[in-house]
């Protein structure tokens, strides 16, 4: 039985909430985590929703931050069951006419990446590999930016321009590139349509709108660092959440599932505890932290009566989507896809992430813009067949395929329309998939299912189906996330902190929001710092 009073209460057992809980408990605060669902993890969610034995990651797929994530090292998550694998062929695009694919390999195989792109353009191959090599050298900077509260000075356009000039100026990439959109940067740098199509989609995978001016620097640094830097969580991405939960238990955290919070108790301007939907009140003597969405935290749980008019205005103005909105198709297969393009390069058949249904940049940009505009795009997807490397994700001799469709925001369609999408869209996509992989016939599919943005909104409380809990745009990134007055993880309610992806740096399986919230809390309460000297951040 949980106690009536704790030092700290965390709302939500998503991976950021679990991260914060482990650090708080280790720092000496008696900590409780309340989770509304029956299990922890949030977007680190692996289930068998189609057929028994076929595991699908309903949300998070690839793990690019595991080498720099502090909690993995500080709490020994590998000793608690976290296992990973890094496929050689990382990202690829196959074509309906069977022309050569483009396959981007992991960073220690840049020779293979160069050879793949060089089938189209030696110039593009050399430039991409050099940009990737320099971006990988930014790992310490990426880690520092992720695992610290946002630095207003470092995020100014002038500072970003200085960095771009220093890193890439000799390649003709000048200061003005940071003012461009990712699409403009990609188009300026690369002549190969097939490569541009792949890079448009990879950019959007990370939530950066391809047409958003002022985010060219994010492509040159962050996107170029992440692409091809992906790991597979063996057993499914939920194994990360399981290991984090075990770390919390080992530290002494109490975790109560199936306990949705109805209200944050505010007394004399201070967060004093929470009230659950069952009516139970649990007190917090030091702090309450919310891993929930910004609007839910401030407007629903705290309530407008306890906020200034400015904070109410800011919360209501915070934008969700359209650039991060997903649907997750799940296919139970007899055989993995066999692409016609494999006659040029068999690595496309064992590529971790494969674009299907995009024959060029025009297809890709039209697909993205349709989704952003509230329209249902022509079926196409980024796909994963994780059972190629992890036998636990499908029965013996079978395969489990998952993908991401980019979709219009949940509110763009009504319940009947989303039901129609779930009934028809996968079958339409299979017809497209078969154009590039002829064995993807109905006879190769045992069963399939589609998880749509409206369902994501209900299940994971990701408004509009937005996986980053807030649009990535210059006014909602860095020191502006979620808005300037709340960018330090603190709120105007004393003792109430934000630790979810509405805060900097946003969505993704990095646990940085929880880690940085601990830094802010430890500064306020005089707790031990999480800094590890060998790591430097």
Image (cartoon, grey):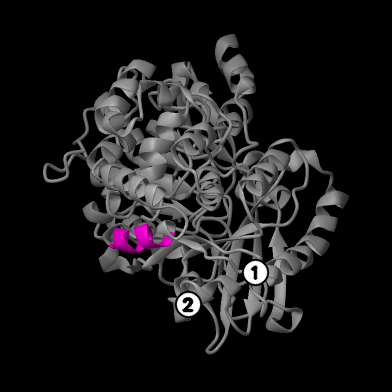
Residue 491 visible in the shown view:
no
Viewer-side residue, 4 vs 196 = 196
Disc marking residue 436: 1
Q: Is residue 201 magenta?
A: no
Q: Which element is circle 1 on? A: helix
In the image, which residues are magenta? 109-116
Q: Which element is circle 2 on? A: helix
Q: Is residue 113 magenta?
A: yes
Q: Which of the 4 quarters of the picture holds residue 489? A: top left
Residue 201, above or below 141: below
| Callout 2 crowding tier (Cα within 10 Å): few <14, some 14–19, many ≥20 | some
Disc marking residue 388: 2
Q: CA distance from mark 1 to mark 2?
A: 19 Å
**Left/right of residue 160 with respect to residue 275 in the rendered view:** left
Viewer-side residue, 499 vs 390 = 390
Residue 379, above or below 161: below
């Amino acid at each position: 039985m949980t106690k009536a009073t704790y030092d700290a209460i965390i709302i939500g057992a998503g991976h950021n909430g679990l991260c914060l809980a482990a650090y708080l408990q280790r720092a000496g605060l008696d900590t409780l985590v309340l989770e509304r669902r029956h299990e922890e993890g949030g977007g680190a969610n692996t289930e068998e929703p189609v057929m028994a034995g076929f595991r699908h990651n309903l949300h998070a797929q690839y793990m690019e931050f595991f080498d720099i994530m502090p909690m993995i090292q500080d709490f020994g998550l590998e000793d608690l069951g976290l296992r990973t694998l890094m496929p050689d062929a990382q990202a690829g695009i196959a074509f309906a006419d069977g022309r050569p694919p483009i396959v981007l390999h992991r960073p220690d195989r840049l020779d293979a990446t160069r050879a793949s792109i060089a089938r189209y353009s030696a110039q593009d191959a050399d430039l991409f590999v050099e940009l990737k090599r320099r971006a990988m050298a930014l790992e310490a900077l990426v880690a520092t930016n992720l695992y610290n509260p946002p630095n207003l000075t470092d995020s100014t356009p002038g500072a970003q321009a200085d960095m771009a000039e220093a890193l890439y100026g000799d390649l003709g990439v000048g200061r003005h590139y940071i003012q461009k959109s990712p699409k403009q940067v990609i188009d300026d740098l690369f002549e190969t349509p097939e490569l541009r199509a792949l890079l448009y989609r990879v950019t959007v995978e990370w939530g950066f709108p391809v047409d958003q001016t002022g985010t060219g620097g994010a492509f040159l640094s962050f996107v170029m660092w992440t692409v091809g830097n992906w790991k597979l969580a063996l057993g499914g991405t939920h194994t990360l959440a399981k290991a984090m939960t075990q770390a919390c238990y080992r530290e002494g955290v109490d975790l109560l599932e199936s306990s949705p919070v109805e209200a944050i108790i505010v007394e004399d301007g201070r967060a004093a505890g929470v009230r659950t939907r069952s009516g139970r009140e649990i007190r917090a003597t030091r702090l309450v932290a919310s891993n929930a969405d910004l609007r839910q935290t401030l407007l629903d749980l705290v309530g407008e009566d306890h906020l200034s008019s400015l904070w109410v205005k800011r919360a209501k103005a915070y934008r969700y989507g359209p650039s991060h909105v997903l649907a997750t198709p799940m296919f139970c297969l007899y055989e993995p896809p066999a692409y016609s393009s494999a006659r040029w390069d068999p690595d496309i058949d064992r590529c971790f992430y494969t674009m299907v249904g995009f024959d060029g940049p025009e297809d890709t940009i039209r697909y993205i813009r349709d989704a952003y505009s509230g329209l249902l795009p022509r079926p196409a997807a980024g796909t994963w067949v994780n059972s190629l490397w992890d036998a636990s994700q499908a029965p013996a001799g079978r395969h489990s395929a998952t993908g991401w469709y980019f979709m219009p925001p949940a509110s763009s369609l009504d319940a009947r329309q989303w039901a129609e999408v779930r009934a028809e869209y996968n079958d339409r996509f299979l017809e497209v998939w078969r154009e590039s992989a002829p064995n993807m016939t109905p006879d190769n599919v045992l069963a399939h299912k589609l998880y749509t943005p409206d369902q994501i909104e209900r299940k994971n409380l990701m408004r509009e189906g937005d996986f980053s809990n807030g649009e990535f745009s210059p006014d909602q990134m860095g020191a502006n996330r979620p808005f300037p007055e709340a960018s330090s993880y603190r709120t105007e309610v004393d003792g109430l902190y934000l630790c979810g992806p509405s805060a900097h740096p946003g969505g993704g399986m990095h646990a940085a929001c929880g880690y940085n919230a601990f830094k802010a809390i430890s500064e306020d309460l005089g707790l031990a710092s999480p800094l590890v000297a060998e790591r430097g951040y």
